[in-house]
Every structure is written in C-alpha cells, then in structure tokens.
Amino acid sequence: MLAGQLDFAAAIVASAAALASVLIYALCPVLIRYLLAHPNERSSHTHATPQGAGVGVISALLIICAAVWLLWRVPPGAMALLPVLVAAFGLMVLGLADDAHALPVSWRFVGQTLAAFVTVLSLPKDLQLFPGFLPFVVERALFALGAVWFVNAVNFLDGLDWITAAQVVPMTLGVVVLQTIGAVPKSVGFLALVLLGATLGFAPFNKHPAKVFLGDAGSLPIGLLLAFMLIHVAGTSSVAALLLALYTMCDSTITLFRRAFNREQIFSAHRSHFYQRAVIAGMTPPQVTARVFVLGLMLTSLAVMAVVLNSTIADVVLLGLGAAATGYVLHVFARGGK
C-alpha cells in the first residue's frame, strides 16, 4: 500500500515537472518577444530577462489535475479544489496582464480579493480555528484577508533567482508529509504534490543567472494555492501553519512595517526586503536562496513535529525555535552575511 502511494506521488511530481518544463521551454520565445523584464529600482537582475513563466507552471498544474481526475483516479474530495483552481487561473491571467503592462494597484487588489473570497467560500463548513470565539463570518473574512496578504507576500519575495522555489518546495513537502499522517485532506496533499512538481520543472530555468522569471503570472496564483493549503494545515495546527509560512511572512511583514514607520511609499518599487539587502551588501543570489531553502526545510520539520506531538508545550518550544532560526537568517541578510 505504501509503495503504491509513493509510486503515485512520484508519478505526479515527475509528470508536473516534465510538463512545466516543456511548456516553459515552448513559451520562452513568446516571453522574450513580448514580456521582457528590464532592470529597474526594484530589480536584482542587471540584464533584460523574460518574465511570465508562471503561465507554464500554473498551466501544467491545471493540466495535471485535470488529467489525473479524468484518466487516472480522482483523489477523495478533489472536486472541492475546483474553486481554488479557478481562482488561481484568474490570478494567473491578472498577473500576466500586469507582467505585460503594469496595472493599477486597485485593479490588482480587487482581483486578489475576489480570488481569496472564492477560495475561502469553498472551504469546508467545519474548518474553523476559533469556534465559539469568533463568529463564522468574521473568521472567514479574516481567512480571506490573510490569503490576500500571503499572495502579496509571495509576490514581494519573488525578486531573486530561485528564491520562490526555495520557499515553495519546503512548504509543499511539508503539506505532503502532513497529508500522509492524516493532518490535511488527501485532495490538499495531492495539490501540494502537483505544485511541488510544477515548481521543480520551473527551477532549472530560474537557476542563477536566470533565463526566465515567474512574473506575477506565477507568484500571485502560487501564493493563493499556498494560502489555501496553509488554511487547511491551520485547521489541524495553527502553529504548524505559522511555521511553514514563517520566513515568507516575516520578511514581507517586517519590511512593510519598517517602510511605513520610515514614512516611505509602501506601494512603490523598492529593494529593502531582507533578501534584497543581503544581495546589495555582497551576498550572491545562490548564497541567499540556499539559506532560505535550508531554513524552509527546518521550519517544515518543526511544523510536522508540532502536529505529531500535539502539545501546547511543544508548540511553544517549536515556535520559539522557528522564530529564533528565522530571526537569525534575517539578521544575517541584514548584515550581508557578516
């Protein structure tokens, strides 16, 4: 039984990776012609590079999901994934339009909010974090707000070769492991497998120096899909969900508050995220992404331990360890590796 599950998981990851690679390779001439990202004040790259490879990643994810459901077997509860997949497709289109020609912030926010509400409204009715404490409608509204912020957090941190993959791979691996121990639905574990594979298919193209970028066409829907998975993880353990997302949330949130405190224009392009400051201070992109990846693996391990131990004391200790490790990495980035 276990061997069959491992074979199925390996087949899904390999198929998604192969398809994403083929699609991105086929799209590259079009991206080079129409979607070149020229260096600007926010960029960490120095040469015009095509963006929009997220179309290949998300298209591969959608195709693999459809193929498995139609030709192989439907994971239990898979139909519940349809709303989030539709919302992710919508964000891919929105992101592609923004990659081609910068859209007003208000348009992006409306699109992200709509996608978040479509996703949140599809959640099981019994998925509540604070039943009896927060009204159902209020908690769902907070879920949507959190999803919008996480979509933007992933987008903000998609500014360096391999850095998005360095975050997505540990998070999706964590969700897969949690599914195997029954902490999240099988359909959510399946979605994590497909996203893991599609991200691995993109990674060779984004290796430093990158040949192509995800663009908003990739970072926005990936952020939504991860937010959906994290909400399900939180249904079992809020600490586990927080640990999985800790680096992404800390780098983006602390940077936002620091810029607001300094009275900077928070919606303007900048290079003041911790990972960007590390590169400016002299660290190479591979050095930065390697640290993000290792931290992600550590946070994933702590998240799985939080679910397995299922103890308030363990939660406090594990969250403290995760916070300390994340704080250390951010400190290293802020000092340029010194």
Image (cartoon, helix red, strand yellow):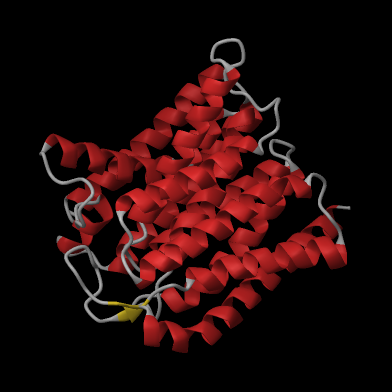
| Name of the residue lying farthest toward the left | 262
Q: Who's the residue at 31% across and 60% down the image?
A: 288
Image-quadrant location for residue 70: bottom right
Q: Nearer the viewer, residue 100 or 66?
A: 100
Q: Nearer the viewer, residue 126 or 173?
A: 126
Residue 10 can be seen in this image: no
The C terminus, quarter of image: bottom left
Residue 260 percent across, percent down from the top left: 17, 38
Image-quadrant location for residue 285: bottom left
Q: Who's the residue at 50% across and 42% down the image?
A: 244
Q: Who's the residue at 61% across and 69% down the image?
A: 59
| Name of the residue lying farthest toward the right | 1
| Name of the residue lying farthest toward the top | 132
| 121 displayed left or right of 167 | right
Q: Who's the residue at 45% across and 56% down the image?
A: 220
Q: Nearer the viewer, residue 141 or 174?
A: 141
Residue 316 can be seen in this image: yes
Residue 71 percent across, percent down from the top left: 86, 68
Q: Nearer the viewer, residue 52 or 192?
A: 52
Q: Is residue 235 above or below residue 83?
A: above
Residue 217 percent across, percent down from the top left: 46, 65
